[in-house]
Amino acid sequence: MQVFALGILVVQIAERDGVPQLAPLYLGLTGLARAIPGLAFTCVALAHALTFFDFTYYYLKLPFLVVFAASGLASLRERGPLLAALFAGLAVAGSAALLLGL
């Protein structure tokens, strides 16, 4: 709700200043100003998380899981969308279980 109200306010300010054609630019700059801190903190969190990550385990198992999921989705393509969706869900669940170490 606040994002919508902020967007309306930015458009109104652009119209008040007499340059309504710049309203999309102002909205884009507002969105960029909101996104930059999130991206910066994400990079810091990723750098912190990678110090505790064991890559050798995932380098061995993850390619096999990706090949299995891709081949299964390719084979189920002709059998119907429900089976393909089910298999995609299982592949996602398997990937999540692998990443969580279950």
Image (tube, rainbow, N blue to C red):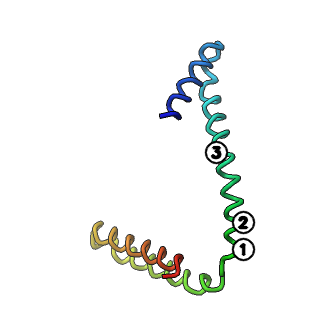
The residue shown at (45%, 82%) is 68
* Dot 2: element: helix
* Dot 1: element: loop
Q: Looking at the rendering, which quadrant does residue 88 occupy?
A: bottom left
Q: Amino acid at mark 2?
A: Ala
Residue identifier under label 1: 51
The residue shown at (64%, 23%) is 22
* Dot 3: element: helix
Q: Position of residue 40 (x, y in %)?
A: 70, 52
- The residue lying toward the viewer, choosing from 30 and 65, is 30
**From what the image shows, is residue 8 above or below residue 40?**
above
The residue shown at (45%, 76%) is 70
Callouts 3 and 1 close, C-beta under 8 Å: no
* Mark number displayed over residue 36: none
Q: Amino acid at mark 3?
A: Ala
Mark 3 or mark 2: whose residue is earlier in sequence? 3
Q: Closer to us: mark 3 or mark 1? A: 1
Residue identifier under label 2: 47
Mark 3, other Cα within 10 Å: few <14 / some 14–19 / many ≥20: few
Mark 2, other Cα within 10 Å: few <14 / some 14–19 / many ≥20: few
Callouts 1 and 2 close, C-beta under 8 Å: yes
Q: Position of residue 69 (x, y in %)?
A: 44, 77
* Mark number displayed over residue 35: 3
Would you say 55 lies left or right of 92 here? right
Mark 1, other Cα within 10 Å: few <14 / some 14–19 / many ≥20: few
Q: Position of residue 19 (x, y in %)?
A: 64, 17
- Per the model, the C-alpha gap separating discs 3 and 2 is 18 Å
Would you say 70 lies left or right of 15 here? left
